[in-house]
Image (cartoon, rainbow, N blue to C red):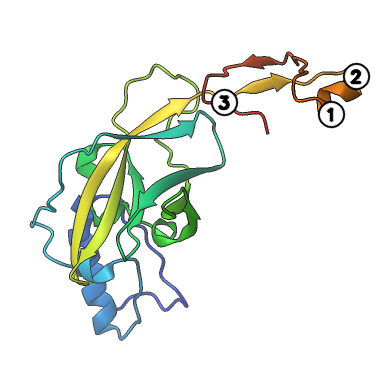
């Protein structure tokens, strides 16, 4: 059967059971002389019956705010030569090739700390299953990474769970704050500034 003649045929494969469907679609596209492209396409069209080995949860925690929109930022301290691909999955067993999208392998690299470690920042689309309101809802949302061993063999690792938190809300001072000159000139002088903050913790910072 000939595929529809369209400029592009776009598809998204979210689960491991759909790999078999992708193999059939890929074969049809090949017979119709249509070009195909996608993230880790060679792995996706491999035998769907072969399970993907995933290591045990490494116990890390990744803070993510409770909100209904916006992207999710995942930060990794990284020492390996090659950068991994990152995905947020609903369950540990979903850590497989199908969970990675186009944004999974796009990291912004920064050097930080006294040893100039590499900090990789991944900005990922917020998944529909992620929490938006109830902080106490039980979940298994995890961070999964995909590396290439020897440049060709994909290796998957579960780094840890998503730790949701409510975003702090600060009430700014409405009146003009008067601070004496001696506070700036003499390090021995200080003046306390009281801010009202909801959902703040010891990790919160005023910038």
Q: Residue furthest bottom?
A: 33
Question: Mark 2 highlights which residue?
Answer: 178
Q: Which residue is mark 3?
A: 204
Left or right, 50 with reference to 133? left
Q: Is residue 22 above or below residue 119?
A: below
Residue at image mark 1? 185
Going from N to C along the chain, the mark reached first, 3 or 1, is 1
In x, y percent, where is residue 50?
8, 57
CB under 8 Å between discs 1 and 2: no
Q: What residue appears at the point 25 percent right and 72 percent down from the top-left corner?
A: 26
**Quadrant of the image occupied by residue 175:** top right
In what element is the residue under mark 1? helix
Lower position in the chain sequence, tag 1 or tag 2: 2
Q: Quadrant of residue 103?
A: bottom left
Asked whether, in this view, residue 191 is left or right of residue 165, the answer is right
Under circle 3, the secondary element is: loop
Q: Between 112 and 141, which is closer to the camera in this rendering? A: 112
The answer to whether residue 78 is above or below residue 26 is above
On screen, residue 61 above or below 30: above
| Secondary structure under the numbered disc 2 in the rendered image | loop
Q: CA distance from mark 1 to mark 2?
A: 15 Å
Residue 82 location, x and y as percent? 32, 65
| Tag nearer the camera, 1 or 2 | 1
The crowding category of the residue bearing disc 3, from other C-alpha atoms within 10 Å (few below 14, some 14 to 19, many at least 20), is: few
Distance from Cα at disc 3 to Cα at disc 1: 28 Å
Rendered residue at 32%/59% (across/down): 84
Quadrant housing the C terminus: top right
């Amino acid at each position: 059967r000939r595929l529809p003649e369209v400029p592009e045929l776009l598809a998204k494969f979210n689960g491991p059971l759909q790999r078999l469907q992708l193999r059939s679609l890929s074969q049809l596209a090949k017979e119709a002389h249509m070009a195909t492209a996608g993230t880790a396409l060679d792995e996706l069209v491999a035998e769907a019956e072969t399970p993907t080995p995933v290591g045990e949860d490494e116990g890390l925690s990744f803070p993510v705010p409770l909100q209904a929109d916006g992207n999710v930022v995942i930060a990794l301290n990284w020492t390996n030569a090659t950068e991994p691909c990152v995905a947020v999955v609903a369950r540990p067993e979903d850590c497989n090739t199908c969970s990675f999208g186009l944004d999974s392998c796009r990291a912004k690299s920064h050097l930080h700390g006294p040893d100039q470690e590499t900090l990789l920042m991944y900005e990922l689309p917020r998944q529909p299953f992620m929490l938006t309101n109830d902080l106490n809802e039980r979940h298994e949302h995890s961070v999964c990474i995909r590396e290439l061993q020897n440049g060709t063999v994909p290796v998957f690792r579960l780094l840890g769970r998503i730790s949701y938190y409510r975003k702090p809300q600060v009430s700014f001072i409405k009146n003009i704050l008067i601070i004496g000159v001696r506070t700036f000139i003499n390090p021995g002088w200080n003046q306390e500034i009281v801010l009202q903050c909801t959902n703040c913790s010891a990790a919160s910072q005023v910038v």
